[in-house]
Image (cartoon, rainbow, N blue to C red):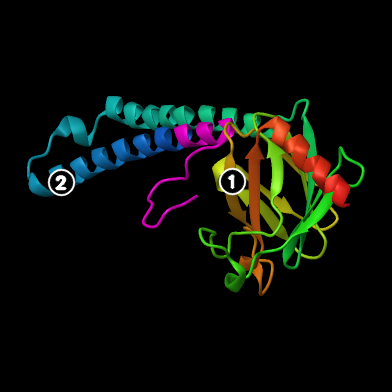
Amino acid sequence: MAHPSQLGFQDAASPVMEELLHFHDHALMIVLLISTFVLYILVAMVTSSLTDQYILDSQEIEIIWTILPAVILILIALPSLRILYLMDEISDPHLTIKAMGHQWYWSYEYTDYEDLGFDSYMIPTQDLLPGQFRLLEADHRMVIPVESPIRILVSAEDVLHSWAVPALGVKMDAVPGRLNQTAFITSRPGVFYGQCSEICGANHSFMPIVVEAVPLEHFETWSSLMLEDA
């Protein structure tokens, strides 16, 4: 959950998000070093009236400033490609959930069960209980077991939507007529909030996503109760 005046990312709740945070810090440090070096050169050029013929015309310096940026790009590209392949890896999921975007709510279907599915609407502000978050709480949460590979199948019924939960490092477009998939593993129990990240219409900001990660035995109890109610 993000906090007021927060500058960084939310705390990671999945291994992929931890990798994304590490890559962000890695790339940010490279950008900081480059910016500091360029600033030093600018200040040196402005404050000094001296010139050097070996700097003005030097093949060695030209080779350096050609090779060095290529090396820096490689240092950024290799970790980036590694994370991209990790995010696309979906192997032996324990649970598959289909998330369907509507104007303006989400519906979830647990495909491993026969009749387990529900719609998830935002709780209006006047109906919120103490401690609940405005514009983020939903009447039905997507409950998943913790430390289990979860596959999400994402699509839309009407217009473009986007299923995104920042703490889990998940963001997948929901396209009508197309079935996209992604996967994640929650590394700790908790409640994680997200929102539709596509401008899908007038009530775009009123279709939150609430993922609740619980221990496996609690998930089995919840699924049994949901099946009984169905």
Using residue 138 as the reference point, say whether residue 73 is left or right of it: left
Q: Is residue 149 visible?
A: no
Earlier along the polypeptide chain: callout 2 or callout 1? 2
Q: Which quadrant of the figure has residue 106? A: bottom right
Q: Which quadrant of the figure has residue 134? A: bottom right
Q: Main secondary structure of the magenta part?
A: loop
What's under tag 1, amino acid-wise?
Answer: Val
Please provide the residue range marked out in magenta. 1-22
Q: What residue appears at the point 7 percent right and 45 percent down from the top-left corner?
A: 49
Using residue 74 as the reference point, say whether residue 69 is left or right of it: left
Q: What residue appears at the point 31 percent right and 39 percent down from the top-left corner?
A: 32
Query: How far apart, in angstroms, are the residues tagged by discs 2 and 1?
Result: 49 Å
Using residue 50 as the reference point, say whether residue 223 is left or right of it: right
Residue on which the image places disc 2? 43
Q: Are there few (<14), some (14-19), or many (20+) residues within 10 Å of tag 1?
A: some
Using residue 213 as the reference point, say whether residue 71 is left or right of it: left
Residue on which the image places disc 1? 191
Q: Considering depth in this image, is 160 or 70 the residue closer to the camera?
A: 160
Q: Position of residue 94 (x, y in %)?
A: 77, 30
